[in-house]
Image (cartoon, rainbow, N blue to C red):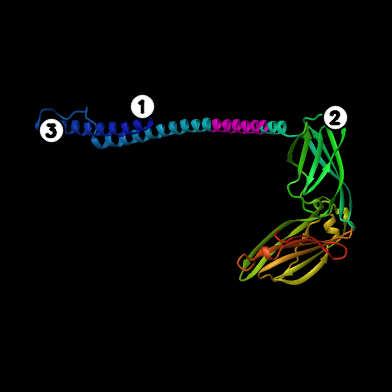
Amino acid sequence: MSVAGILIAIPVLAIAIIIISFVLYNRRLDKITKGEIHDTHTKLPEPSNVTGATYKIILMAFTVIILINISTNAGLIRSQRQQIEKMQQNIFELTYTVEDLKNTIDSSLSLTSYTGFEVLDTDMDSKKTKIMYEVMLNEYTDDTEVALILNDEKIPFEKKETGKFVAEFYVDTFGHYREPKLTVTQNGITKAEASDFPEEVFWDVIPMPLFNCTFNSEMSLGKAKYSGYYNLNFDRPEDVESVTITYLVDGKETKTMDITAQAISRENIDIEKGMTVKSNLVFLLNIKTKSGLTIEDKTVMIYDDIQCDVEDLEYERIYDKDGKLLWENDYK
């Protein structure tokens, strides 16, 4: 019988016992009243005592059953939890196996087993960057030819050793190379696949900044309460000559500071206190490089999303030594 059936049967049985005790007790009283029997020491228990004892037994029985049921369910839950954990582990292992199999299939279908490039040199006067690109082919013949397609330019590779092809070439440092492709021609058949050549080379050759910020801010009574700090990361800090930061509060320049030393060493810099910010606080970062470039980064740090349109306030720009705009990102 299930636990639910037992819980129903116990009160039914208790009610039956109580009813039977009432019936027997009333019959005995009737016989004593009629003189058929005399009241003796072998009395039937009174119904009230029977009812009280029955209630106690029911409560004890319920308590025991509930404890047993809780213990049983706890064991089932532990068992099910272990099964779920085992299933999750199996799913993880299966996912890993499927991903590994996919990578193996992709690798076998790919034209190359390895591709990689290295920046050899950059001339900021000519805005040219020299690149070395290496390719290892999965399949090749004596007449195999390899080329890299950058926009409309076809760059041929030179065979260096078995299956290895290398090309050295110059690209526009601030050019944009969309959907670069690698082509392999053998036995008169040309196949192409996407190349991992970067769309914009300058990210690999100049110290573009990255803010790491820890700020707490909230708008209260039309003003921002704020606190926190920030630091800067550069891929090529050795090319940084100077770094300044300007606080723009609601569109007005408030303070400009030289943070060259802290920026290069990636120190945490406390945000300026005591500024009354109603709509937005913007950081305007200005970086001068030893190679003659100027990098400007304008980033909104604190703002009221009702009054401020962030996209209209942010941009990244790169200027040459003569102040000519080389690159701009106005949709950060």
Amino acid beneath label 3: Asp
Q: Where 234 sits versus 221, above or below?
A: above
Q: Which image quarter is the N terminus in?
A: top left
Earlier-in-chain disc, 3 versus 1: 1
The stretch of residues the image draws in magenta is 81-101
Magenta-drawn stretch, dominant element (helix, strand or loop): helix
Q: Is residue 91 magenta?
A: yes
Residue 211 colored in magenta in the image: no
Q: Mark 3, residues whose alpha carbon is within 10 Å: few (<14), some, or many (≥20)?
A: few
Q: Which residue in the structure is indicated by mark 1?
A: 1
| Picture quarter with the C terminus | bottom right
Q: Nearer the viewer, mark 3 or mark 1?
A: 1
Look at mark 2 in the image and give the residue it sits on: 162
The span from disc 3 to disc 1 (Cα, nearest Å) is 40 Å
Determine which of the numbered discs, if any, sits on residue 30 in the image. 3
**Rendered location of residue 204, percent (x, y):** 82, 50
> Does residue 58 appear to the left or right of 48 in the view shown?
right
**Left or right: 40 with respect to 245?**
left
Q: Residue at x 62, y 64 (%)?
A: 305
Coordinates of residue 264 in the picture (x, y in percent): 85, 56
Q: Observer-nearest residue: 64 or 311?
A: 311
119 in relation to 292, above or below: above
Instruction: Identify which amino acid the numbered label 2 is placed on.
Output: Thr
Give the residue type at disc 1: Met
Give x and y (percent) for residue 80.
52, 31
Mark closer to the observer (2, 3): 2
Q: Which residue occupies the foreground of this view, 287 or 23?
A: 287
Label 1 crowding class (10 Å Cα cut-off): few <14, some 14-19, many 20+?
Answer: few
The answer to whether mark 2 and mark 1 are in CB contact below 8 A is no
